Amino acid sequence: MKSHARRLHARSGPHGSTCVRLLQLLPVLLVAIGCGSGGGDAGSAEPTGASSGATTAATAPAADTQSSKAPVAAAPAAPVQSAPPIRLDPPSLDFGFVAPSSASTGTVALVNTGATPLKILAVQPSCKCTTISDLAGKEIPAGGSVDLEATLDAQPAPGPKRAQIRVLVEGYTQVVTVQLQAEVALPVRVTPPYINAVEGKNQTGRLVVQATDGKPFRICSAHGLPPRYLGFDPATEELRSQYLLEYDVADFGSRLPRYFVIETDRPDAPLVDVLLRHENSFPAINIRMKDYRIPAGVLATGQSKEFTIRLDNRIDRPAPPINAAISRSSDGMVEFVRQEVDAENEEVLVTLRLTPKASFEGFLYLPFTIFAQNGQTQDLDVFAKVSPGGAISCPEPASAGG
């Protein structure tokens, strides 16, 4: 019995002491696991053997949790927060002076200055006035280029014309922007292209009237009145390609014209107009027009001439049908002729007939009104030059200041 007790004591001695020590360390292990700090420090204080197994059992759930997580797939590369390495050649398309309602075409090369190919995703112009070649899906090789062809349609009225083309490239958040610009001008242009006379400003001023081709010409009238030259006497000096004129808004009286018109002796620019911005120069808008500038050119004395006005005809804002037109001046008549819808350009083309009074000659600025079937009306102005046989001629020049 004694030997058996000694053997039992010998077997239980070491393990019994281990159990006591585990019980003593258990609160420490629980605190360590609960705080999420791991079991490194507690494990280093534990003996080997049974205590090692207890530590493994305590930490096993954490190991199982980690192993149950699905592997994370690699995220796709984020787009580069910059513009692609593309150089424009030339840097922009500048068409210079262009005629009203003309179309100008140019080409710009998109040069890939990077070390890898670039794929074009989309090419978008900023307005309907610009048509472009289809480059979507095209690839620009490293060091290579592709050509972008663009056509810019000029507006009917003189003045600056600007547009943009945006090129989106795969893998880049910023677009490449191609700038297009032109100066819509008649062969004779006026600078500045408008008179800003609102709120009593610029009631008098100066205008530069210049031939864009440098050819000498004569100014016949300034809105039907003798031109007021500065530094030039037409009676004694040779004709020039550029003149400096004075204007005075008071010359127009109580009814200000929308356009101040300069009459010249050039067949390609008999009438050159300048927009006059004033509270009393622009009519109330009842019927929306594509253009409120209505030149009728040159007419022979006693003859009629047809001209066209353009109504805005968008899907969400269709133009009303026009059925009549009348003049508001005794200097001539305006009659409705016909109309047709241009769906592609979202406009209605209304043809009218201008007939000056039989005895009328000279510069004609005629106010008139169009009438729609729905009862709407719109006041407008048409201007023209009336001369015997439709000749481009000027009266005998008077001395400067006359």
Image (cartoon, rainbow, N blue to C red):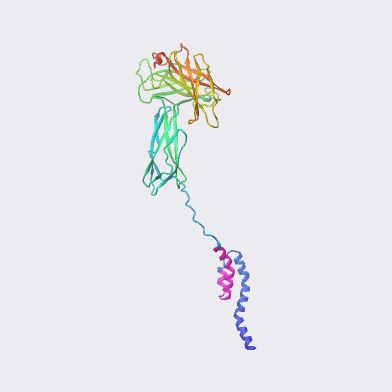
Q: Is residue 61 magenta-colored?
A: yes
Rendered-image quadrant of the C terminus: top left
Q: Quadrant of residue 242?
A: top left
Residue 322 visible within the image: yes
Query: Is residue 286 left or right of 305 when viewed as pictured?
Result: right
Of 310 and 59, nearer the camera is 310
Which residue, as the protein is rendered here, is positioned at the far top?
359
Q: Residue at x 61, y 85 (%)?
A: 7
Main secondary structure of the magenta stretch: helix
Quadrant assignment, res 266: top left
Q: Which residue ends up furthest to the right in the rendered image?
A: 1
Q: Quadrant of residue 395?
A: top left
Observer-nearest of 317 and 196: 317
Q: Is residue 232 left or right of residue 32?
A: left
* Residue 384: percent from left, percent from top: 45, 18
Percent coordinates x, y for residue 152 in the rendering: 42, 33
Q: Residue at x 43, y 23 (%)?
A: 207
Q: Quadrant of the N terminus?
A: bottom right
Q: Position of residue 71 (x, y in %)?
A: 52, 59
| Magenta highlight range | 41-67
